[in-house]
């Protein structure tokens, strides 16, 4: 049975605009309790953040720091998981990105669909050249 929190204060709307990444976790992505592995979520967050970083850096980036990572609610098999990412700081060679993750539930069951914010993270990427050395982030 689907575990949808009854607390209406957890229910939110998706942010405006398109997500950077959207996916559906599968049974192979679960831990022994049936929840999606935190590591799976972390890897998806890193992918979403790096897409924004690559676009802004106009080239390769490397993850250099996970500044914060908060798991607010569990993610379940079949949730539609959306990743929204925004640049919060640009340094000489670095780009800091805020990633918010939302799970839409109830879609498969044909019942009431709800949306819950499940994860928040801030990551820092460094623009790198072909030799994997830091390079300047281009001006806009």
Image (cartoon, rainbow, N blue to C red):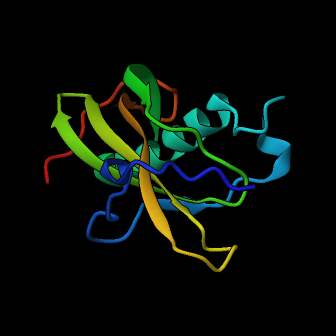
In the image, 127 versus 37, the foreground residue is 37
In the image, 93 versus 124, the foreground residue is 124
Q: Judge whether 112 appears above or below 86 on screen.
A: below
How many marks overall?
0
Whole-percent x, y for residue 107 in the image:
61, 73
Picture residue at 51% right of the left edge, 35% below the top: 130
Whole-percent x, y for residue 113 in the image:
51, 71
- Residue 47 visible somewhere in the drawing: yes
Whole-percent x, y for residue 97 in the image:
30, 38
Q: Is residue 48 left or right of residue 136?
A: right
Res 19 quadrant in image: bottom left
Res 17 quadrant in image: bottom left
Q: Judge whether 58 appears above or below 118 on screen.
A: below
Whole-percent x, y for residue 133 in the image:
43, 22
Tell me the quadrant of the picture where the N terminus can be found.
bottom right
Tell me the quadrant of the picture where the C terminus can be found.
bottom left
- Residue 58 visible somewhere in the drawing: no
Picture residue at 41% right of the left edge, 21% below the top: 66
Q: Is residue 17 left or right of residue 62?
A: left
Q: Is residue 120 left or right of residue 34?
A: left
In the image, 93 versus 104, the foreground residue is 104
Picture residue at 26% right of the left edge, 69% below the top: 16
Picture residue at 32% right of the left edge, 65% below the top: 13
Q: Judge whether 44 appears above or below 39 on screen.
A: below
| Residue most extreme to the front | 6
| Residue most extreme to the bottom | 110
């Amino acid at each position: 049975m689907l575990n949808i929190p009854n607390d209406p204060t957890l229910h939110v709307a998706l942010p405006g605009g398109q997500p950077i990444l959207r996916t559906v976790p599968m049974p192979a992505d679960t831990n022994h309790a049936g929840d999606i592995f935190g590591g799976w979520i972390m890897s998806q967050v890193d992918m979403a953040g790096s897409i924004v970083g690559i676009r802004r850096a106009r080239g390769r980036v490397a993850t250099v720091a996970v500044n914060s990572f908060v798991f607010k609610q569990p993610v379940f098999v079949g949730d539609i998981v959306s990743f929204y990412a925004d640049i919060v700081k640009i340094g000489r060679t670095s780009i800091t990105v805020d990633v918010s993750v939302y799970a839409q539930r109830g879609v498969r069951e044909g019942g009431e669909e709800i949306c819950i914010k499940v994860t928040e993270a801030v990551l820092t990427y460094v623009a790198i050249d072909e030799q994997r050395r830091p390079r300047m982030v281009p001006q806009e």
